[in-house]
Image (cartoon, rainbow, N blue to C red):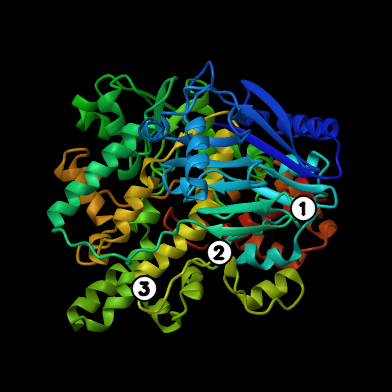
Amino acid sequence: MCGISGIISRQLSSGEIRSRLERMGSIQKHRGPDDEREQVFLSDDTLVGLGFVRLAILDLDTGMQPVVSKKDGCAIVCNGQVYNYIELRKEVSSEEFVTRGDIEVALHLYRKKGIEFLDCLNGMYAGAVFDPQRKRVLLFRDRFGIKPLYYTCTDEGFFFSSEIKPLLEGGMIRSELDQESLPVYFSYRYVPGEKTMFKNIRRLPPGSFLEYSLESGSFSIRRYWEYLPGRDGVTSSGREAEDHFIQLLEDAVRIRMRSDVEVASLLSGGIDSSSVASLAAVSQPDIKLFTVSFDDPLYNELDDVRALMSAEKQVFSGAELIHSSCDPRSLENLPQLIRSVEDCISLGTILPTDQVCRLASRHVKVVLTGEGADEVFAGYRKFLLEMAAEEIGSMSVKDIELLLRDFPELLNYIPVRASDPGKRFIQSELLFDQSELSRLLGSETGEITFPEDAMPAVNSSMHPLNQLLAMECRSRLPDYVVLRLDKLSMRHSLETRTPYLDYRLAEFASGLPVHMKVNLAERMGKYICRKSLLKHRIVGPVTAFREKKPFTIPMAAWLLQRDNLPDYVREIFQGGEIERTGILDPEMTKQIWNSVTADGIGPATLVSEADRIFAVLTFSLWMKEFVA
């Protein structure tokens, strides 16, 4: 785990490139506090600089980067981990290795296979290869975009980095708001696709590579992998599918336990993190488990964690549970978190995520997590809602009555349910509608359409549930969910590994019929996961069929404690900060601020006045931190 940076330039000198790489590395030193290195290469009249800051986890003695091939001068820097490097090393065993780690294996695979080497890698990674023979630099990112990679172009050259701040503070580009991203952010709570909230700074899409020609100075981006559920049907029986799921998950956890330092696990009490922790504890009985609790019982999962460990005494007999409490005082840290996340995202879970990562980092360098299962296997309530909307037309009157009892929101959803998957994707979670956006931003925004570069290759023949799953895994997962996990864990120099985002599990899920993911009769998402994990005794029945509880904060309740809120909150909403910024309508924001209520609001509430004001709060802090 680390941070990478790079400069391609015909204008800058070697000394200047090295100096800037050092500066870029120091800015993201939290990603790699153990070591650093910069190296500059020459290709005709173009210089290529590669920088690396290291968090030493694997191959502690020889795993420094860039790694350079002695045969042809090909060089690589990579942030992340290739988990199947032991198996892949056999394919390039004839090469002369200078390290014992995973990234040199990737380099030699590239030298052997070219761009197709990406099809072989199983892991989380974002890296760059300098290829003097083909006169190109190749930037690449893992299939789900677990590891970030940003880039920008200026008159001085092409620059890239694991984070945005090195591009801004390293002297590459000014920090400016991209006005076109504003209505998108206030609709989705994040900016999907290649754009960021920063003008002229873009992110390489997940499952993609960027090929930069050192001869022409031009580049192109192509996808090498995409999650499209429903492409291939499963021919095996339900029992065989359940067994196959467990085999894949067990192996996903097994290879993510590969480390030269201790591996621990985050644990919330839900089925995803519980199953990962349970499988990890089999091979590491003294595993450390980390969780956070809340005073509000609707949000607190500590009792669920303890119940799980008590019920599974044989598995967790040697495990150590370490926890801390998350309360309104954590709002004091929000400005720091906005700076660490960089991309403007409005997500209440950033507060407990940061806290549990800080807690874990005091003890270990690596943790496993349960992220990805809800997106790949349809765990969110919105997927149940979509299945219900699709099937209600073929139900009996009695079944419809029962369905509406369990999904009362269907009455409002079905009449406005869009046929276009891009529009339907956000309907249940839209933060501000078009008229509200126009008022909030002070100008007509027009219809907010889903960014074209964030759209998966869905078509009308796909089941509506599969369409939404493809959308979820192409945009919200990389640009919202795992983005916050990466930035907040690396803020504390902690590596997080996500077994449920093993691409083999995703490809397996893509071939499952929809009823194996969402069982509407039992009102249950992630159906095959629950059945399989219970059948193979990975978790008990209480955990297996436990209702999804979002990992977030009691946002409304916290924001209503007006006398105890941090000074920056009062300054934004009562001290004239919004007026001074001059972007958002102050009267509308005050109206929302005064309308916040905790009545009827819980962890499963998708949109509330608290969510809307939190988006305003997040944006205002982002502006103050990066632009104002």
Q: Residues within 10 Å of mark 2 (few under 14, many from 20)?
A: many
- Residue 615 vs 30, above or below: the answer is below
Q: Which of the two discs, 2 and 1, sits closer to the camera?
A: 1
The amino acid at mark 1 is: Cys
Q: Residues within 10 Å of mark 1 (few under 14, many from 20)?
A: some
Whether residue 358 sits left or right of residue 165 in the image: it is: left
Residue 618: percent from left, percent from top: 66, 52
Residue 332: percent from left, percent from top: 65, 37
Q: Which of the two discs, 1 and 3, sits closer to the camera?
A: 1
Q: Is residue 103 visible?
A: yes
Q: Which residue is mark 1?
A: 153
Q: CA distance from mark 3 to mark 2?
A: 18 Å
Q: Which residue is mark 2?
A: 454
Q: Residues within 10 Å of mark 3 (few under 14, many from 20)?
A: many
Q: CA distance from mark 2 to mark 1?
A: 21 Å
Whether residue 437 sits left or right of residue 397 in the image: it is: right
- Give the residue at x 61% y 63%: 595
Q: Quadrant of the N terminus?
A: top right
- Give the residue at x 85% y 52%: 155
Whether residue 438 sits left or right of residue 543 in the image: it is: right
Q: Which residue is mark 3?
A: 464
Specify the label residue 60 is tagged with.
none
